[in-house]
Image (spheres, rainbow, N blue to C red):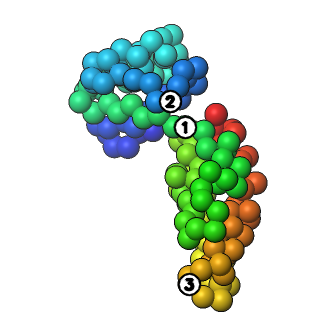
Amino acid sequence: MYQMSPTETYWFIIFNNKGSIDGDGPRSGAAMRKQALEKVRGWAHGIEQAVQATDENRIVFSRIGESWRLRNLGTLPRGELITLAGDAAHPMTPNLGQGGCCAMEDAVVLAKAVAGAQSFSGASLAARLRLYESARWKRWFKLTVRAS
């Protein structure tokens, strides 16, 4: 929990879901609060009370899927001028505090890789995008595994 102001607290709950990430999650605020309360029952530091006090219209339920199985984005068409960065490449849970930082790192490494292309079309740029992916893979893998 993070105290944002005298009247607002930001909280999140992270748990592993044994089912498919495509499955149905709770849809209503009341259902989301009920599931959150089930997860934090008995926790210390006022967490259960914070969840209970939260306006159910302000509760958001988000699934974060594991992308580390994509190994070098292998499911993307080869030779294409496409890549992923930020959460699209490496969704991770907020408790790591690394999502925004990792996205900025992606931007720097991608910019450096693209700057080395001989042209901004065709094989030269595609090769530079693959170079970016290879350069970022180890960092993405470590963080997304920790987030799982």
Judge depth for marks 1 and 3 and give the one in front: 3
Around disc 2, counting alpha carbons within 10 Å, would you say few (fewer than 14), some (14 to 19), or many (20 or more)?
A: few
> Could you tell me how far apart the alpha carbons at marks 2 and 1 are, in whole angstroms?
6 Å
Residue shown at 23% from the left, 30% from the top: 57
Around disc 1, counting alpha carbons within 10 Å, would you say few (fewer than 14), some (14 to 19), or many (20 or more)?
A: some
> Could you tell me how far apart the alpha carbons at marks 1 and 3 are, in whole angstroms?
32 Å
Judge depth for marks 3 and 2 and give the one in front: 3
Q: Quadrant of residue 69?
A: top right
Disc 2 marks which residue? 21
Find out whether the residues at labels 2 and 1 contact each other: C-beta distance under 8 Å: yes
Residue shown at 52% from the left, 52% from the top: 88
Disc 3 marks which residue? 120
Q: Position of residue 26 (x, y in %)?
A: 35, 22
Check residue 65 in the rendering and tell me which mark sits there, or answer none. 1
Q: Position of residue 143 (x, y in %)?
A: 68, 46
Around disc 3, counting alpha carbons within 10 Å, would you say few (fewer than 14), some (14 to 19), or many (20 or more)?
A: some
Q: Name the residue type under label 1.
A: Gly
Lower sequence index among marks 2 and 1: 2
